[in-house]
Amino acid sequence: MKILIILPNWLGDAVMATPAIELLAKYYPSARFTFVGSYVSIEALKYHPLCEEAIVDETKKAPNRMKATYQLAKKLGSFDMAISFRNQIHASLLLKLTGSVVCVAKKSWHSAFLLSHTPTIKADKHLSKQYSELAMINTDAWDKVTPKLRLYIEPKKFDKPTMGINAGATYGSAKRWYPERFAQVAAEFSDRYEIIIFGGPNEVDMAKEIESSLVASNITSYVNLAGKTDIRELCSLIGGCSLFITNDSGPMHVASAYNVPTISIFGPTKHHETSQWMNEKSTIVRHDMECSPCMRRECPLGHHECMKSITASEVIEAVKELNL
């Protein structure tokens, strides 16, 4: 059974879609997947053993996106089932233009007009559950159980216990706790763990701030890999960590896929929807605020109190309570 899957754009969202993909593999034993998505989502998920083709969607860069979408659809051809986890008009159009009979996407004005199956999925549950409901909409036998996150990249095997520090969050500054406080947490446990500082190409400066703080505290048991890893390396390294300290971010969900003990620091986002899915050794550190969750990229009030009020001592205590 040939199944086309349009992946979410963000790394974290793509990882949160993996339980839905596992359900499709379970309930359609002859499933063979074609993935279409952003560079980061494809790089993370293309190693699935049932993935026959993985295509980076670059239609947004084309002079005429409609034409590029049409050309991509004709290149893909028809499928037994086509599903979009991206609620966007060009994704709906891409499914339609493949000529696939069964086309599934969350209900919206464009999907309802273009596609065969457009269920209303309530956003009152974790995003992994939402994706799973969408994937299983055409399956009567589904037992309503959403499995764990799953990545097929082999985790790194470190010689010593290793703590990962992730101070970035691609979505925006509102989701980011402060580099100096990450450094304080890392310093507290530097006698027990080797430290890896993670970060994307746009987060190198934050990582350097953490590094400078560690150097000032005479801590040498660290490596700064910000901006130096591709997606596969990032997933492998995070998967091998013994402990992960992170903002609400894509790497946070990668850690969950490997069941890495994690402290997640939340501010302006909806933790009930995007917390680590089914990671028993996961703790959220957050403060209830009248203005949160605002879901904004930058603090609209200018005070960033949802993050500023979280102290390094709170995160340190949360680590200790994991009893690792």
Image (tube, rainbow, N blue to C red):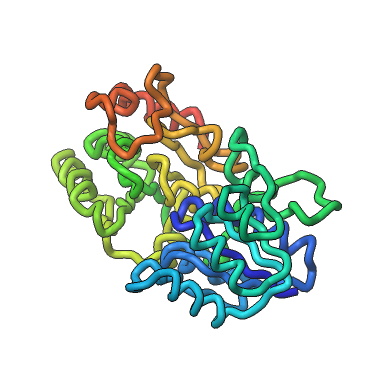
Looking at the picture, how far across and down is residue 259, in whole percent? 56, 48
Relative to residue 54, is residue 187 depicted above or below?
above
Q: Residue furthest right?
A: 141
Task: Name the residue: 54% across, 37% down.
Answer: 273
Q: Which residue lies furthest to the front in this view?
A: 113
Left or right placement of residue 54 versus residue 118 in this view: left
- Classify the position of the N terminus by image quarter: bottom right
Q: In the image shown, does 157 or 120 lie closer to the viewer? A: 120
> Is residue 32 visible to the viewer in this orientation of the structure?
no
Q: Which residue lies furthest to the bottom in this view?
A: 75
Relative to residue 124, is residue 107 depicted above or below?
below
Looking at the picture, how far across and down is residue 287, in whole percent? 41, 21
> Is residue 141 visible to the viewer in this orientation of the structure?
yes
Left or right placement of residue 273 versus residue 179 in this view: right
Find residue 232 and report its image quarter: bottom left
Looking at the picture, how far across and down is residue 99, in whole percent? 66, 74
Task: Name the residue: 44% across, 37% down.
Answer: 264
Left or right placement of residue 100 versus residue 214 in this view: right
Q: In the image shown, does 35 or 108 lie closer to the viewer? A: 108
Task: Name the residue: 40% across, 50% down.
Answer: 162
Left or right placement of residue 242 versus residue 31 in this view: left
Task: Name the residue: 17% across, 39% down.
Answer: 217
Relative to residue 241, is residue 4 depicted above or below?
below
